Image (cartoon, rainbow, N blue to C red):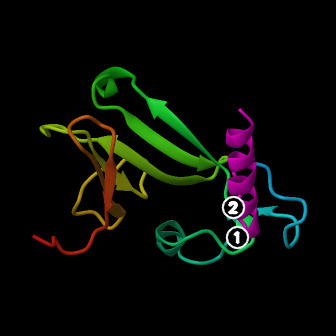
Amino acid sequence: DAAAEARQKKLTQQLEDVGIMPVFDPCPNPSSTGPQSIFDMRTYDGDRRDFLMNPAPKGFTVECRITRDRSGLNKFYPKYIVETEQGDFLMSSKKRTHNKTSNYLISMSKTEASKMSDSYLGKLRSNFLGSEFVAYGPGMNPE
């Protein structure tokens, strides 16, 4: 239908006029303000907690790999390891027991998974269906 095509073309142009692409393209736009660089964690000399709790440095992309460990006792409560593509450990997560919904403890330690440890970053909780997730930091409980 010609009217539908004309409407779609008009909406596409309106989106492009405000800088929104109508189709997601994961590749960086070649006309953007320069090439994106991959961030190398080995060159970072700041606090790892600050790095993990804040957005990536401007102009950089942090590429990570998530590995799931379901061996042994982790069969029903898996552990996830987040590492950079270069293999530098960033954080881990463990599914917590005795919860009605999926609930994960996030830590800066590969082995220690406790809310009381210094490596505790927060938790990730899902709704009953597992379709929505909320991340909570280590701050005070708002309730």
Relative to 97, residue 24 above or below? below
Image quadrant holding the N terminus, namely top right
* Residue at point 47%, 32% (across, down): 68
Relative to 94, residue 30 above or below? below
Say few, some or many: other residues with alpha carbon within 10 Å of mark 2 (under 14 / 14 to 19 / 20 or more): few
Along the line of sight, which residue is nearer the eye, 46 or 64?
Answer: 64
How far apart are the alpha carbons under marks 1 and 2? 5 Å
Say few, some or many: other residues with alpha carbon within 10 Å of mark 1 (under 14 / 14 to 19 / 20 or more): few
**Are the two marked residues, 1 and 2, in contact with CB atoms closer than 8 angstroms?**
yes
Position of residue 87 measured from the top left corner of the image (x, y, whole percent): 66, 46
Residue 98 is a magenta residue: no
Relative to 118, residue 6 above or below? above
Kind of residue sitting beneath label 2: Leu
- Left or right side of 84 for 136: left
Q: Is residue 86 visible?
A: no
Kind of residue sitting beneath label 1: Val
Along the line of sight, which residue is nearer the eye, 31 or 143?
Answer: 31
Secondary structure beneath dot 2 equals helix
Image quadrant holding the C terminus, namely bottom left
Spot the residue most to the bottom.
Answer: 46
- Identify the residue under disc 1: 18
* Residue at point 67%, 72% (across, down): 44
- Identify the residue under disc 2: 15
- Left or right side of 72 for 65: right
Span colored in magenta: 1-26
